[in-house]
Image (tube, rainbow, N blue to C red):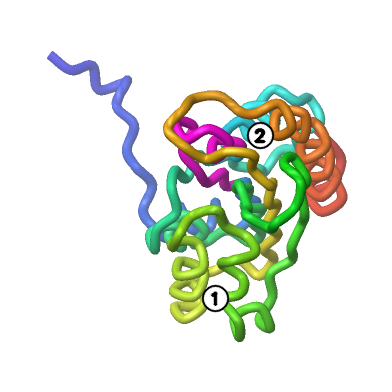
Amino acid sequence: MLNSSKLVQAAPPDVQQAHRRARTIVLALGNPLRGDDGVGIAIINALETNPRLPKGVDLIDGGTPGVDTSLLLQGYHRAIIVDAAEMGLLPGTWAQFVLNDIAFLKLNDVDQLISAHSAGLAEALELGYTLGILPDDITICGIQPSTIGWSSGLSNPVQEAIPAVCSAILEILNRVEGSPS
């Protein structure tokens, strides 16, 4: 017999969207079973326990990017996407990109700069842009991997970059979202 007091009814989609519009998403992309490709998940795990994380922020493990990534961003007013990024830099070097309408003119170039995946993020952003469902403010934090292969755990240079990337994300969140809770 089910105890009805423990059942929670899902909010209607319009209520869910209203809740998201007041929020920011930090979306980690990547696969922790592929070495440094798991850096995004490591970063949201570190942010999750940080007392400086403000209210109104959803930390989401988005897995490997595909066009459905655009649906994860739908309804949020602000997004920070964290992923391993093949930028031709030293391992552990990271960069921050602010995505705007101009970036959509050269999505193939954007994909080469911001994603270590062969496809996915650029297409998801293009789809979301075309459908008009992307947040107005999107920042992408890319971390140069050392190795992406079938192994668990991060390389030392990438592991050492996590505190700096977390600090930069917290600075953005606290500047935009207000005082930490």
Q: Could you tell me which residue is drawn at 68 percent across and 47 percent down?
A: 144
Q: Could you tell me which residue is drawn at 78 percent across and 25 percent down?
A: 51
Q: Residues within 10 Å of mark 1 (few under 14, many from 20)?
A: few
Furthest residue toward top: 1
Out of 130 and 116, give the one closest to the viewer.
Answer: 116
Task: Check the image and report above or below for 89 versus 159.
Answer: below
Disc sitting over residue 166 in the figure: none
Magenta range is 27-39
Left or right, residue 137 beside residue 117: right
Mark 2 vs mark 1, foreground winner is 1
Q: Could you tell me which residue is drawn at 61 percent across and 28 percent down?
A: 154
Q: Amino acid at mark 2?
A: Ile
Task: Check the image and report above or below for 109 versus 168.
Answer: below
All told, the count of numbered labels is: 2
Measure the C-alpha gap from mark 2 to mark 1. Answer: 26 Å
The C terminus, quarter of image: top right
Furthest residue toward left: 1
Q: Which residue is mark 1?
A: 108
Mark 2 and mark 1 residues within 8 Å of each other at the beta carbon: no
Counting residues from the N terminus, which is met first, the one under dot 2 or under dot 1? 2
Look at the image and tell me whether residue 23 can be seen: no
